[in-house]
Amino acid sequence: MSQGLSPNLQHLETSATIAISQEAKRRRAAGEDVIDLGAGEPDFPTPSIPADAGVRAIREGKTHYPANEGILELRAAAAKHLSLLSGGRPVNADHVVISNGSKQSLFNVCFSLFGPGDVVAIPAPAWVSYPQIVHLTRARPVLVPGDPEWSLKVGVRDLERVVPGAQGLILCSPCNPTGGVYTHAEIKAIAQWAVERKVWVITDEIYRRIHYGPGPAPSFLDLPDELLERVVVIYGVSKAYAMTGWRIGIALAPGKIAKAMAALQSHTTTGANHPAQFAAAAALGDERVEQDVMRMVAEFRKRRDLVVGRFRRDLPGVEFVDPLGAFYFFFRVDSLGGSSGTEFCTRLITESGVALVPGSAFGDDRYVRLSYAAATGDIERALEKIVGFAKKLGD
Ligand SMILES: Cc1ncc(COP(=O)(O)O)c(C=O)c1O
């Protein structure tokens, strides 16, 4: 960072994924034909029930300051929804805090829990914002490399080896950027380790509904209470409900932490966008929206199958993580003429007009992330170009 800025920002970098999308937009504006498979944003419109509820809230004058912790309607709908996803377990609405997007929820929880001298473990590859958010608290993020033989996931042995004295762990399942999903047994083992080691677990489950196995992806909320005393669940409507622009995030935390998070945002944002909270409450609380979610997930599944099928057929030597959730495909490029992810993506956008995100953004530049949250026609065209480019590199 340039001189004059506070040490608070000493590690700050712009989000690499947002930078790629901006580069794709810039090239498009300059008249280039660029297909953007970089952005992690559903291409579907927000379903009409939450959209109408948001408009209605504006018309009804719900346009003043909201409660700091979020409106009761949304906190209650979120608690009921999370309870239903985990077989009816009790979920206390008083422990739910609503923020302007789950990114802010993550910031609030990290800022409430960690500070100078703390170490926070982050399984890698990891979503770009985790290390940045931990740096903003002045704690130290430590990446724990995932096992390539195991969908780049980590287990207790990895955590013990790399970060035996960590104060926190941020886990993401289904995972951005890999599409990997932790099983119930894997989650339980990590939760038990965290209890023994008194580690706070922040479990980012924003992609929980976008799961290609039966039902929602396994969650920490499927575990018994005694394993959840130091667990904070991050959830949201951005991804599964195609509501990225409404900026609503959800955190479920032990009471004291939930209060601290609400107090923190009372001094930063006051609270989340008021009418948008009614839209999110309708998304989570109205059963008819479930049909919309199922339709979108079915569509993501078709696109996933398209990408996987094409790679298997045309690039059989290229390894990738088995994508079981979210809408990302994470493939390895170092077998293609020794290319790094950065080189691959830089040349791909210049020579073939396809924007993907290099693994360097997530802590492992042997890989590249493709987002299939895009129109099928665009994915087909992009695959054609990627296959042609990869074959050229591999020759
Ligand atoms: C893993 C993960 N967590 C959190 C977020 C933030 O989502 P939002 O702030 O839109 O709720 C994203 C968005 O890209 C994400 O991929």
Image: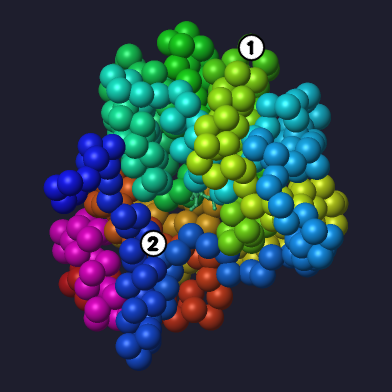
Q: Residue furthest bottom?
A: 31
Q: Residue at x 74, y 38 (%)?
A: 75
Q: Residue at x 31, y 55 (%)?
A: 14
Q: Magenta segment: does it hold 151?
A: no
Q: Amino acid at mark 1?
A: Glu
The relative height of residue 157 versus residue 303 in the rendered view (above or below) is above
Tell me, yes or no, if residue 223 can be seen here. Answer: yes
Q: Nearer the viewer, residue 249 or 47?
A: 249
Mark 2 to mark 1: distance in Å? 39 Å
Q: Secondary structure at mark 2?
A: helix
Circle on res. 226: 1
Circle on res. 18: 2
Q: Residue at x 63, y 11 (%)?
A: 226
Q: In this picture, which residue range is highlighted in magenta? A: 331-353
Judge left or right: residue 298 versus residue 106. right
Judge left or right: residue 144 versus residue 190. left
Cβ(mark 1) to ligand 1 < 8 Å? Answer: no
Q: Secondary structure at mark 1?
A: helix
Residue 53, percent from left and from top? 80, 60
Q: Amino acid at mark 2?
A: Ile
Residue 377, percent from left and from top? 53, 80
Q: Nearer the viewer, residue 6 or 153?
A: 6
The relative height of residue 133 versus residue 246 in the rendered view (above or below) is above
Q: Residue at x 47, y 56 (%)?
A: 328
Residue 379, percent from left and from top? 48, 74
Q: Quadrant of residue 228?
A: top right
The relative height of residue 231 versus residue 85 in the rendered view (above or below) is above
